[in-house]
């Protein structure tokens, strides 16, 4: 067992309360927008797909700055 003590910094309760209030206000606003048909909801699966595609696109842009990335061509279906 290591003799080094690890101290965890405690969050400032004033900041925690302010953040909680900001997020609570945002959540209520979003709820009201959905209830009043001002925004369209999407499924969690669809949202995750959008995030995955955005991340993949971001990494593709980063890689293209350092090394050329060949574009993939769609595979042709082989007829038998």
Image (tube, rainbow, N blue to C red):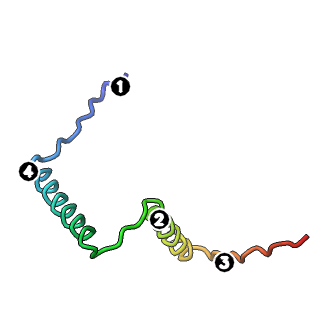
Label 2: which secondary element: helix
Q: Residue at x 88, y 73 (%)?
A: 79
Distance Cα–Cα, label 2 vs label 3: 25 Å
Q: Nearer the viewer, mark 4 or mark 2?
A: 2
Q: Nearer the viewer, mark 1 or mark 2?
A: 2
Residue matched to label 1: 2
Q: Is residue 29 left or right of residue 67?
A: left
Q: CA distance from mark 3 to mark 4?
A: 51 Å
Quick one: which residue is furthest to the left in this view?
14
Marker disc for residue 71: 3
Viewer-side label of 3, 1 = 3
Q: Position of residue 62 (x, y in %)?
A: 51, 72
Give the answer, above or below, for where 11 lies relative to 51. Answer: above
Front position among marks 4 and 1: 4
- Residue name at image x 72 percent, y 76 percent: 74
Dot 2 or dot 3, earlier in sequence = 2
Ranked by sequence position, the earlier of labels 4 and 1 is 1
Can you say whether 2 is above or below 56 in the image?
above
Of tags 2 and 3, the one toward the viewer is: 2
Mark 3, secondary structure of its residue: loop
> Which residue is at 23% across, 38% downward?
8
* Residue bearing the label numbered 4: 14
Disc number placed over residue 46 in the picture, else none: 2
Dot 3 and dot 1 residues touching (CB under 8 Å): no
Say which quarter of the image contains residue 64.
bottom right
The disc, 1 or 2, on the residue closer to the chain's N-terminal end is 1
Count residues near mark 2 (Cα–Cα under 10 Å), then give few for <14, some for 14-19, many for 20+.
few
Q: Secondary structure at mark 1?
A: loop
Q: Earlier in the sequence, mark 3 or mark 4?
A: 4
- The residue carrying pointer 1 sits among few (fewer than 14), some (14 to 19) or many (20 or more) residues within 10 Å by Cα, namely few
Determine whether the residue tagged by mark 4 lies in a helix, strand or loop: helix
* Gap between marks 4 and 2 measured at Cα: 36 Å
């Amino acid at each position: 067992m290591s003799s080094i003590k690890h101290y965890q910094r405690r969050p400032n309760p004033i900041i925690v309360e302010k953040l909680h209030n900001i997020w609570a206000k945002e959540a209520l606003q979003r709820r009201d927008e959905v209830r009043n048909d001002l925004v369209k909801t999407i499924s969690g699966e669809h949202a995750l797909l959008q995030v995955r595609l955005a991340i993949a696109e971001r990494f593709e842009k980063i890689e293209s700055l350092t090394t050329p990335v060949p574009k993939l061509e769609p595979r042709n279906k082989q007829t038998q």
